Image (cartoon, grey):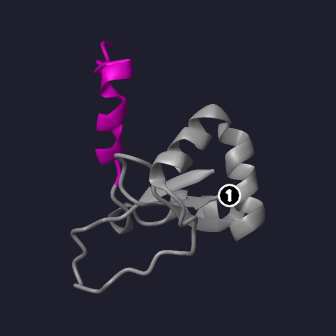
Amino acid sequence: MTLLTENSQSSNNTVSKFPEGPKNSKFLRTARIIMNPLGYLEEKYQQYGDIFSHEFSSFPRQVIVSHPQGIQEIFTADSKLFESGSGNQIALPLVGRIRYCY
């Protein structure tokens, strides 16, 4: 499963349309995914299919992709098409900065 987030610095000034996703309270969605992440994502997969958008409390909107071919296309696409790395700031308090020493 791969998560994509909205890139607000689009170079062509087009409005991006996200796939359909849950509309209930962000707080409830966040609580449910914390308590049972795999069960919750499986439920949403059954409800919305291979690709759906989602918003959790204090996080930007995300697109969740669960189809293997879709995930492969994302990871083999031109890196200029996707923003990466900015979401890593969320995990910093948990994992700290990784420094490579060779």
- 65 lies left or right of 89: right
Secondary structure at numbered mark 1:
loop
Of the pair 30 and 1, the residue shown nearer to us:
30
Image location (x, y in percent) of residue 53: 53, 65
Location of the C terminus by quadrant is top left
Q: Amino acid at mark 1?
A: Ser
Residue 55 position (above or below residue 37): below
Residue in the picture at 25% in, 68% down = 8
Expressed as whole percent of the image width and height from the top left, the position of residue 55 reads 45, 57
Quadrant in the picture for residue 24:
bottom right
What's the residue at 75%, 54% (across, down)? 43
Q: Residue tagged by mark 1?
A: 66
Residue located 72% across and 60% down the image: 45
Q: Quadrant of residue 15?
A: bottom left
Q: Is residue 16 visible?
A: yes
From the viewer's perspective, is 20 left or right of 59?
right
Which percent across, then down, holds residue 46?
78, 62
Residue 35 or 42: which is nearer the viewer? 35
Q: Residue at the far top: name it.
A: 101
The boundaries of the magenta stretch are: 84-102
